[in-house]
Amino acid sequence: MGLIPANQARGLFTQSLVDVYKQIPPTSNFLEMFFPKKTSSSRYIYWSVRRQGEPKAVDVIRGTDGNRNTFSISTDKIVDPPYFREYFDVTQTDLYYRAWDSALIDESKMADWMNWVLEQTQSLHDKIKRSYEYQRAQVLTTGIITYADGTTVDYKRNAASKIAYSSGIDWAATTGSPAVSTVNPFAAMAGGAQYLRTYGKAMGGNFIIIMGDNVKAAFDTNTFVLERQRTFNMKLDDLTPPFREANGSAYHGRISIGDYTGDIFTYPQFYDTSTPANPNTSTPYIDPNALIMIPMNPRFITGYAAVPFLPKSNESGFDLAMPAIQAGEYAIGNYMDSKKIAWEVDIRSAGIALPTAVDMIWTSHPTTS
């Protein structure tokens, strides 16, 4: 039986907690792929937007001054990202009392308790990760992020990039007997690709297509889709059985949409929305009736600001010249409170999904519940 002095155990706990925390496997993070991480050492996140377009040069007569060019000033934006702090008391388990029952700590009992602490820490980490994934889904669906207190961040997406449901665009609508679909999904998605290329200035000819559950079901049964798949001598598409990716998405193949192509994905992942009155309920990240299109490499980010901090302290008190700025995706800490008789572990983060090129999103709702 290995024993360690109790006065060394807390340091061991803190070091092990940080080391293992950094190795926590990610939750489902398909949308995170399109929002790479950037960190700031400030409370606020700043970014700039400049729209330049794709003008062509006009020839001039030799010997003249030529064409004078002017450029619009960048629009600077600032946001105070939502702040997350999740914590728990590590003494709230019988394993704590077993581990800390004497001046000499049993290493095996300490290991059992630390494993329990790390499991709870991972759970808190996953909660915050899901909130960020939900933010990304909000950006791609409506362009508006809503905080818990009702505050909203509206990225002012162009009205033409958000197509509301109407019977005239319903992929599931049919007419006649036998039933024939009235809306061509390929034409609808070609319109989305054209918007992204012309208004969004997206480069490349292939786009990411994310379908909600109802949209994918309507696509699979649409007669325009079925008929084109029967035309074997026209290799326009390469639809395949769903292939589940490690990030939680499912890939369904590539299709031709006008002058462009698109890779179809679904994202059958959920976050818990249970309440005492409605237990065991969950909500999908992607609206079942939403069709989302973005370029292969959109210019979006997940920005992380610094979390609240205090100046470092030393034996003589606060050392105001040495602030302990905690910049990064997450900050983890543990604190003893003699008054509450508690030992708390927390995870803090202050991040937000930012569509820096907000015109690189096109969303439609071609089905209804």
Image (cartoon, rainbow, N blue to C red):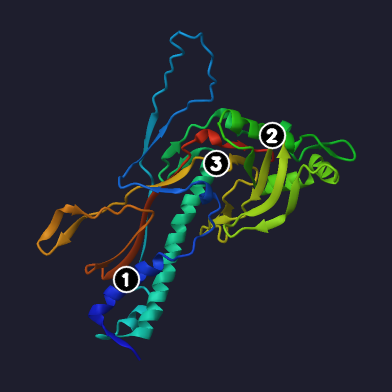
Amino acid type assigned to the residue bearing label 1 in the image:
Gln
Whichever of labels 3 and 1 marks the residue nearer the N terminus, that label is 1
Mark 3 and mark 1: span between their CA atoms? 39 Å
Mark 3 and mark 2: span between their CA atoms? 18 Å
Q: Secondary structure at mark 1?
A: helix
Amino acid type assigned to the residue bearing label 3 in the image:
Leu
Quadrant for the C terminus, please. top right
139 shown above or below 108: above
Outermost residue, left side: 316
Q: Going 41% across and 70% down the picture, which residue do you hit?
A: 118
154 shown above or below 101: above
Please identify, in this view, whether the residue under mark 3 or under mark 2 is nearer the observer.
2
User: Does any portion of residue 89 appear in the rendered image?
Assistant: no
Q: From the image, tell me which residue sits under label 1.
A: 15
Left or right relative to 207: residue 241 = right
| Residues at circles 3 and 2 in contact by the CB criterion of under 8 Å | no
Badge 3 crowding class, 10 Å Cα cut-off, few under 14, some 14 to 19, many 20 or more, is many
Q: From the image, tell me which residue sits under label 3.
A: 140
Q: Going 60% across and 45% down the picture, which residue do you hit?
A: 287
Q: From the image, tell me which residue sits under label 2.
A: 190
Q: Position of residue 75 (x, y in %)?
A: 40, 29
* Quadrant of the image occupied by residue 64: top left
